[in-house]
Amino acid sequence: MEFIRAFIVGGLICVVGQVLIDLTKLTPARIMVLFVVAGVILGALGIYPILVEWGGAGATVPIIGFGNTLAKGVIEDVNEKGLLGAFSGGVRAGAVGIAAAVFFGYIMAVVSKPKIKNKA
Amino acid sequence: MEQKRTKEEYKKWSQKQAPKSPKIKRILMAFLVGGAICTIGQVIQNALLGTGLDEKSAGAATTLFMIFIGAFLTGINVYDDIGRVGGAGASIPVTGFANSIVSPAMEYKKEGYVMGVGARMFLIAGPVLVYGIITSIVVGIIYYIIK
């Protein structure tokens, strides 16, 4: 059942993105920025964690879930270390994602060759 | 004469229909592709939880795996095809975040490993991190004040 819930929640989040692209002519890059920022705010307000509870990976795999992770980290760290936590929490909570993106991104970019464009 | 009329009618009809039906198809494909990617994420997460990892670590490790998959599929020139079919369904999941790093880095490799690969990796990931981190700091400061 949790696979179906993940499919539905993940699918619907992507539909929101697609509708925004179609209606507003926002580029995918801007949508991604918008989604991360929305994730931080919805996470801080305690709304996004409800979606994570129900949708599992359907809510955490989309980039908006990364925003939620940043918010969660910041709140944990502020509770623990006060104002310093506002600066440490986000990057700490997102560390695995950021480091993995840099590491795998770099390796794949170095070893791969881009497709020759005129083939398509 | 009649042909002209039908042509005009067709033009009107297609103007009314054309932007609509591909739009619905794009939305449907975004749902299917996005949903499928997240379901793969759930499968990975469940498998990791099965190995005895706690929930937090399993979540982080799932992100790590998804980023690897996204980067790998971009490197072998498959993710662009997924993106063409899935639209936002391919770009919104964290695999699309990985794609946004590898894709420009590959393309600008000829500009060198520092200003080519190193800099272009962050063409889209950079703004995402900048705005994500800034928002989280602002949220943290507000939370510190009001808590």
Image (spheres, coloured by chain):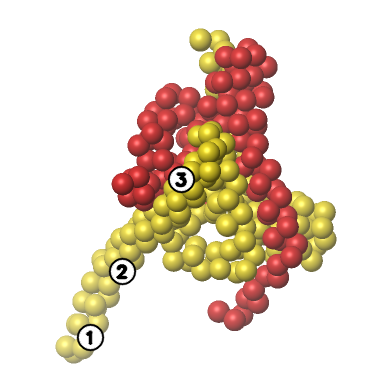
The image shows residue A63 at horizontal and vertical percentages of 51, 44
10 Å crowding of disc 3: few (<14), some (14-19), many (20+): some
Q: Chain of mark 3?
A: B
The image quadrant of residue B70 is bottom right
Which quarter of the rendering shows the N terminus of chain B? Answer: bottom left
Q: CA distance from mark 2 to mark 3?
A: 42 Å
Which residue corresponds to mark 3?
Answer: B46
> Dot 2: what SS?
loop
Which residue corresponds to mark 2?
Answer: B18
10 Å crowding of disc 1: few (<14), some (14-19), many (20+): few
First reached walking from the N terminus: tag 3 or tag 1: 1
Which residue corresponds to mark 1?
Answer: B4
- Above or below, B79 relative to A5: below
Kind of residue at disc 1: Lys
> Comparing marks 3 and 1, which lies closer to the viewer?
3
- Above or below, A92 relative to B1: above
Residue at left offset 62%, top offset 58%: B71
First reached walking from the N terminus: tag 2 or tag 3: 2
Kind of residue at disc 2: Ala
- Above or below, B12 relative to A7: below
Chain given the colour yellow: B
Residue at left offset 51%, top offset 10%: B147
> Comparing marks 2 and 1, which lies closer to the viewer?
2
